[in-house]
Image (cartoon, helix red, strand yellow):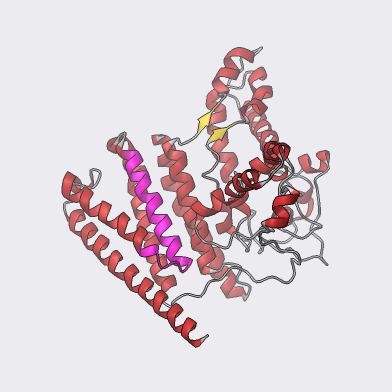
Amino acid sequence: METYGKILLIAMPAFLLLVLFEKWYGWRKGFDTVRTMDMLSSLSSGVTNVVKDVLGLSIGLLSYGWLLEHLAITEIKATWLVYLVAFIVLDFQGYWVHRWSHHINIFWNRHIIHHSSEEFNLACALRQSISSVLQLFTFLLIPAAILGVPEKVIAVIAPLHLFAQFWYHTRHIGKMGILEKIIVTPSHHRVHHAINPEYLDKNLSQIFIWWDKWFGTFQEELDDVPCVYGITRPAATWNPVKINFQHVWLLMKDAWRTSSWWDKLRIWFMPTGWRPADVEANFPVPKIDDVYHFEKYNPAHHRLLPAWSWFQMLVILAFISYFFASIAAIGSPQIFIYGAFVFASIYALTELMDGNPYAILFESIKNIFGIVWLLQTNDWFGAVGAFPVVRWILIIYFIGATLIVGWFCRELITTDATVSVAT
């Protein structure tokens, strides 16, 4: 937990700088692939994911340590060759987890957030799940356990394997020659994120593209078929918490509404997107039929909202940077309270970005909690003891943020009322 937090203190600024560099590069070249609100939604998803991971909010039904203890037929030292074997084994596991996530209804919920952006850029790589609370696929590491790959090797390789999947989320790199036959490239992954019928559910590999070629899921990017990005049932929100649970909520409603007991049971394990016939007829949901002619999600907003949203995001990043640097000192259960505060901050911000006037309610709850915590503990999770001025900075921020968000929400209500009268 503490070690991962320290790793993220280095990784987060690096990823943010790369995201901003891509934005600048696209603007400079006249090919901007990064919309501001979409980027902020991606960053907010990344925040919720790393906080969830640092807090350890998931349950592993089967640990690699247990597999190693009971299945290893040999014991090997952690040489460079062992690290390479571990990397390949993790990539093999990643391919199959990824494939099942695309093809089985209930598992799609753990992956939908990653595909929810209607753009394709480095920022959307940060859209990672908070809904996968059960780790079910450790059994795919059985080959590594049998070979006796040390547990510490897996612990080192796992985050590196994840971070290595960041760079190819871009439209600014074309095809890469011989590398196209070995590793996943931006061209391969553009296909993977596309919703064109030719590309759907293809190129599921994470590092080595050969898995797709061996198991029949490879598709080359075609010059005459431009990739269109997103999900066929659009998320229609910037709120990552909502996106993470949209699909499972639909499954729950469909299972309740269908009159067939067989459908109530099998809906969870049917191909992704399958719905009972009676529910689909009576409760249709919006779906993109023509991928080349649909309107991307882009709710109207006040011209000052992007600037305020950026300010709020930078404040949130400051909050979690302190959190990751001080997680051991903060201790339990305070770390979970802090994590809830970060989640509330993200929820309030993205509701405002969505144009929801009730964003003032969420913002007020977050800020009232902050002020009450400061007054009751006379501290902010250890920060005030080291820097007394933090108390007044935070109080001013909590009060000011409430007033500013209240003003934005009043503008939303006034604008809606004016539109209604005009209509």
Q: At which x and y percent is residue 176?
A: 74, 56
Position of 316 with respect to 178 (left or right) is left
Q: Nearer the viewer, residue 244 or 394?
A: 244
Q: In which quadrant will I find the N terminus?
A: top left
Q: Is residue 344 above or below residue 4?
A: below
Position of 227 with respect to 62 (left or right) is right
Q: Is residue 405 above or below residue 373?
A: below
x 41%, y 38%: residue: 55
Position of 312 with respect to 69 (left or right) is left
x 45%, y 51%: residue: 47
Q: Which residues are magenta?
A: 335-360
Q: At which x and y percent is residue 130?
A: 51, 44
Q: At which x and y percent is residue 10?
A: 44, 47
Q: Is residue 421 magenta?
A: no
Q: Residue furthest front?
A: 259
Q: At which x and y percent is residue 357?
A: 41, 68
x 23%, y 43%: residue: 382
Identify the image quadrant of residue 412.
Answer: bottom left
Q: Nearer the viewer, residue 60 or 179?
A: 60
Q: Is residue 345 magenta?
A: yes
Q: Nearer the viewer, residue 197 or 279?
A: 279
* Residue 228 appears in the rendering: yes
Q: Main secondary structure of the magenta part?
A: helix
Q: Residue furthest bottom?
A: 422
* Residue 190 appears in the rendering: no
> How many numbered marks does the figure carry?
0
Position of 55 with respect to 224 (left or right) is left
x 66%, y 12%: residue: 73
